[in-house]
Image: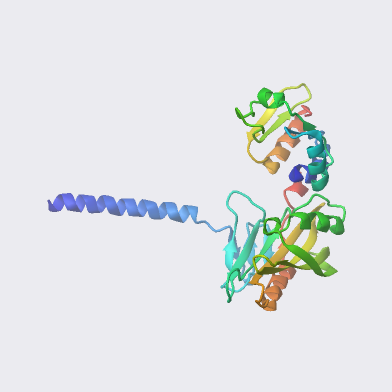
Amino acid sequence: MEGHQRNLYLYERFNARVVGVSRDDVTTLKYWGDGLGVTFPLLSNVTGFLGTYFQIQPEGKPIFGRRTVIIDKTGIIRYVRDGSPEFKDILLFLKKLNQEGGKP
Amino acid sequence: MKRKVFLILCMMLVGMWLSACATTQTAQKPYRISPQGTVIWEDEFEFMPPPPDWKLLRPEGGGDINFGFMRSDLGGFPSTTTFAYDEEPFGCTAASFEGREKEFFKRFLFNAILNFQVLDRKEVQVVGGEGLQVDVEGKDPVRGEKVRARVIFGKRGDRIIGFYITQWRPMDGTYDTAAFDIFDKFVKSFKFLKKSFYETL
């Protein structure tokens, strides 16, 4: 999340917005986000349906797997990567998407 | 029988030669030495290297630092000194060094759970621009260890970069200030040879 926060000015340049999703409750996320200095939205999804939707909900575990998803302005998923975010890869993809006119 | 042994020997030699080729390819160095004796790192950075007793540190598959150097010091555990260049020091703020300093020290050596005391804080010149140098000492009375660190924040384009040195000692050990001089020489000699990835976007 810290890396995304550092890159916010570049995401704005490429007409992209970033949102974090977690299974933590709202209060926990607020303290966690404030501690890191995160200013973009963090969504609390305690019930975990987003994890099921994005197929990152390990069975029987109260957490999500780590996955980066880029959705374009028409709602089409254009990029999916598992594990820690590859920030340079993400930025290059967003730049390309923005140049194509398919603003995320 | 002799012919069979000869064939096996030939096959082994070919195998050894192939494995030697593979080793050479994977061991490609990310740096070269300039005629002036400086290190040119991936054609992106130039700096004066530390003496040969310092080992190169480079995280595989990414990590908290870009690269650095480490030396085992005389004395008992944990007597070591490490310094590094970090393109993405902990924290997010790029507006001010002071803001980044606060964020950075929330995470710096976090796992060691130390009580830090700021020894000195001053403005410095680094990589051709303004910077901030912070000297700290952390102590862990339970494990009987202490660490002295110098963190230097500078700018590369719009982003804050960092250099830092940590020197660990047992609680009754003495610090080696000469290592900090070597670090300072490394930082003073450090140059960017081209724009960063972020500046080219």
Of all residues, the one furthest to the front in this rendering is B142
Q: Is residue B52 above or below residue A35?
A: below
Image mark count: 0
Residue shown at 80%/58% (left/top)?
Answer: B155
Q: Is residue B22 above or below residue B163?
A: above
Percent across and percent down for residue B70 are 60, 66
Residue shown at 27%/50% (left/top)?
Answer: B11
Quarter of the image holding residue B100?
A: bottom right
Of all residues, the one furthest to the left in this rendering is B1
Q: Is residue A10 above or below residue B176?
A: above
Quarter of the image holding residue B58?
A: bottom right
Percent across and percent down for residue B197 are 72, 48
Left or right for B37, reference B130: left
Left or right for A99, reference B23: right
Residue shown at 79%/61% (left/top)?
Answer: B153
How was the colour assigned to the protein in this rendering?
A: rainbow
| Residue B58 shows in the view | yes
Q: Nearer the viewer, residue A3 or B140?
A: B140
Q: Is residue B199 above or below residue A48?
A: below
Q: Nearer the viewer, residue A72 or B30?
A: A72
Quarter of the image holding residue B73?
A: bottom right
| Residue A17 shows in the view | no
Percent across and percent down for residue B67 are 64, 59
Quadrant for the C terminus of chain B in the image: top right
